[in-house]
Amino acid sequence: MTEQNDPRFATTLARGLSVLRAFRVTDEGLSNAEIAQRTGLPKSTVSRLTFTLGELGYLVQSPRDDRFRPGPTLVAVGHVAATSLSFLVPAHDLMQRLAEESGTLVVLAVRDGDKMVLIRTWRPTRVASIWLEVGQRIPLQPFSSWRAFIAAATPAEIERIAAEHLPDPESLDALLVGRPQALADMALQGFVSTPAGSGMSAAYNAVSVPFRSSNLAEPVVFTCGALPAEAPIKRMETDVGPRLAAAVRTLERLTGQAPGLVRMEA
């Protein structure tokens, strides 16, 4: 039985949360029509949801342009959630140092349905880095972040993802077919890599390492990315990848977390 068919599943709540997830860091507010386009919900449904979320303080509506923005209640909830991720405190210095030393953009991504969402970025100060921002979503494709996630996910976690009836099950199947190679790469070198041009439209070289926090139900992924002109894939794999793997192992020791990679099943 899927969650949507389970009588305990609150469809209205799920739709309200999808409205909140529609917002991105770069947005200057969203109209009901834009929210409807991003969520796939009817505009009439979105209007009722944004009104309710506004009454509860999760959204605010500007009197100048009628566009909705995150409200104080949502900001407070997000602050509590971010504070609960205690590993972010020691991760900051480790990943900023890595960004500076490697000249790459370092990001932290978590899964949200069929996307990986960036929740933190660390940029080198003296190098032009690729343009990825907090809130940006990475589609379900064989990018390094997804490969690292699939390598670290347990069979039960993978089964839960498959049961969500994602819009593009073929892409998940392709990732699962590549899971043994991702596990082998992690075992051999401590990271997975993806060169520019892989997947749908990756314009940058990337290396990724999973991290498992006791505060979260699934692994998260740290990734270093750079344009090919700034960091050829060979340097990413021989220099940046080992640096990222070492940084994540240090983070595991500092936070007392178990390694993010599970053993390959027989």
Image: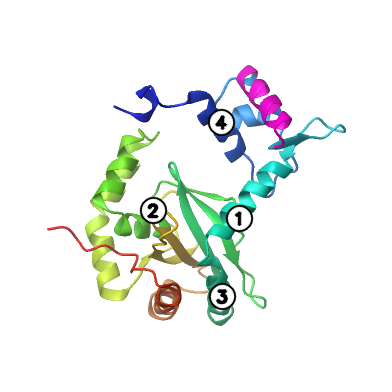
Q: Which mark is residue 39?
A: 4
Callout 3: SS: helix
Residue occupied by mark 3: 99
Which mark sits nearer the N-terminus, 3 or 4? 4
Residue occupied by mark 1: 134
Residues packed near mark 3 inside 10 Å, few (<14), some (14 to 19) or many (20 plus): many
Q: Which mark is residue 95?
A: none
> Of the residues tagged 2 and 3, which is closer to the observer?
2
User: Could you tell me how far apart the alpha carbons at marks 2 and 3 are, in whole angstroms?
Assistant: 25 Å
Q: Name the residue at the left extreme.
A: 266
Q: Is residue 253 magenta?
A: no
Residues in magenta?
Answer: 44-57
Does the CB distance between marks 2 and 1 fall below 8 Å?
no
In depth, the one of 68 and 56 nearer the eye is: 56
Callout 1: SS: loop
Which mark sits nearer the N-terminus, 2 or 1? 1
Residue beneath the point at 42% across and 62% down:
213
Secondary structure character of the magenta stretch overall: helix
Which mark sits nearer the N-terminus, 2 or 4? 4
Residue 259 in the image, given as x and y percentages of width and height: 33, 69
